Image (cartoon, grey):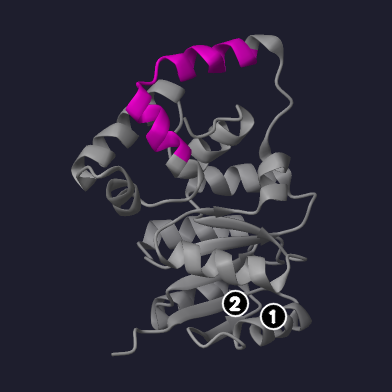
Amino acid sequence: MKSKNITVMLVDDHELIREGIKQIIELEEDIDVIAQVGDGKEAIKLAMECTPDVILLDINMPKMNGIDVLRRFKDLGIKSKTIMLTIYNDREYLLETMKIGADGYILKDSDAEGLVKAIRDVNSGKTYIQPSIASLLIDKIDEKENNIDTIRINSLTKREYEVLTLIAEGLSNKNIADKLYISEKTVKNHVSSIFKKIHVNDRIQAAIFAFKNNIKKL
């Protein structure tokens, strides 16, 4: 039995960019573009009507920018996964959407392979951060901040450290549980403890923390 295709909605005020992304996506047999719109307010209405699996959302738009649209998605309980489309000078906007709870970040000039991977990863419950964006989000840290992070890392148990490396890879709780041969409930407990110890609020922030501190598999 054929599995259900991933449904995608494109939100960008530039029609040429929307059409270019659509052409890339439509080459994939398992992904369908079911809606596209160039206005933030219309995007909210369309997301509620179409309930796409994944929404590609431009940050910089007139009338209502991507940050405000994402915030409304969360307020309205829209369950679609959201990938933010951005350009290099959007650092502060990216930090804001990270706090709100975007599921992925990708540059508009990303290659087709990266775009498709982002859609598939996010749809499956993973987070996706394009590597060049991850480095963009990392602040230049001073010695004091570095020492604080070291203390936080050292407070992690061996298992929590291992779970953090898998979070940074974009794995969901279920995938982590399968990989470590433990229950999903146990993973959730580890994730909660990790967030408290390293002082972050969500998986994206945890991944950024791991990237910044060069945390790798044991």
Q: Residue at x 74, y 50 (%)?
A: 90
Q: What secondary structure prevails in the magenta region?
A: helix
Start-end of magenta stretch = 145-165
Q: Residue at x 59, y 55 (%)?
A: 67
Q: Are marks 1 and 2 in contact (CB under 8 Å)?
A: yes
* Residue type, label 2: Leu
Residue 130 sits in quarter: bottom right
Residue 159 spot, x, y in % from top left: 33, 29
Question: Is residue 161 one of those drawn in magenta?
Answer: yes
**Mark 2 falls on what kind of element?**
strand
Query: Would you place residue 174 above or below residue 145 in this image?
Result: below
Query: Which of these two is toward me, 72 or 177?
Result: 177
Pointer 1 residue: 18
Numbered label tally: 2
Q: Is residue 81 visible?
A: no
* Residue type, label 1: Arg
Query: Would you place residue 100 above or below residue 156 in this image?
Result: below
Residue 104 sits in quarter: bottom right
The answer to whether residue 44 is left or right of residue 61 is left
The answer to whether residue 124 is left or right of residue 177 is right
Question: Is residue 126 one of those drawn in magenta?
Answer: no
In the rendered image, the residue lying farthest to the front is: 218
Pointer 2 residue: 10
Q: Residue at x 62, y 88 (%)?
A: 27
Query: Which of these two is toward me, 84 or 45?
Result: 84
CA neighbours of label 2 inside 10 A, class few (<14), some (14 to 19), many (20+): many
Q: Is residue 117 visible?
A: yes
Q: Residue at x 41, y 28 (%)?
A: 161
**Mark 1 falls on what kind of element?**
helix
Residue 17 spot, x, y in % from top left: 75, 78
| Inter-mark Cα distance, 1 to 2 | 6 Å
